[in-house]
Image: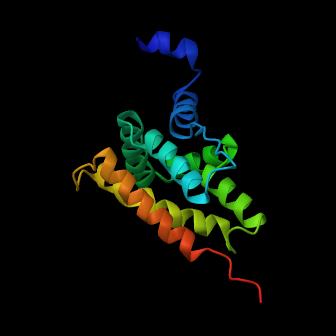
Amino acid sequence: MSKKTLYQFFDSKQVLFETLIIERLFAPIEYVPLSTDSMEKQLFGLMTSIAACIFCDERLSLLRSVVTETSRNPAVRQLVADLFQLSGRSLPIQNWLTTQSEAGRLDIPDVPEASDLLFGMTLGGPMLGQLTHCKPSRSQEKLEEFMAYGIRVFLEGHRPLPQT
């Protein structure tokens, strides 16, 4: 596509960048757990949906570019942070954890912190390995085993204490 044609769709480079970030990087993750499933199965389904979204080559390439630009340019860093807030996209891990915490099924005093912890325990390491090319990609089976282990540890650590 020529620049002239491109600018028929986007008014400026910034609008093009904003659209790319919102629609590609902050694309919503669609997952609706079955209430009849165990928490472990619900969480595994959620994390599998997130993995399918973030481990696609297009998203990883975009993440590499954004990381590079945000580390070099404070204006881009601020723009990405603002776009994330303005996108209004809900974070599915936080939503799920809030639901479980409010229902008394998990003891989570700080949902955003617990969300970061869960992501790190299940997808953070594999994602970092793929972003940096420092580790070979895990097979789907190995990734699922890793996620299942992290989910079990996370859930066990956040079970509510029995009432006495």
Picture coordinates of residue 95, whole percent (x, y): 69, 54
Picture coordinates of residue 70, whole percent (x, y): 45, 51
**Tell me, what colour scheme is on the image?**
rainbow
> What is the quadrant of the N terminus in the image?
top left
> What is the quadrant of the C terminus in the image?
bottom right
Residue 135 appears in the rendering: yes
- State the residue in front, 111 or 48: 48
Residue beneath the point at 49% across and 63% down: 151
- State the residue in front, 82 or 84: 84
Numbered-mark total: 0
Q: Is residue 63 left or right of residue 160?
A: left
Residue beneath the point at 70% across and 49% down: 35
Q: Is residue 152 above or below residue 55?
A: below
- Please, which residue is most extreme toward the front here? 36
Residue beneath the point at 53% across and 16% down: 7
Which quadrant of the view contains residue 148?
bottom left
Picture coordinates of residue 21, whole percent (x, y): 53, 37
Picture coordinates of residue 116, whole percent (x, y): 54, 64
Residue 75 appears in the rendering: no
Residue beneath the point at 59% across and 68% down: 114
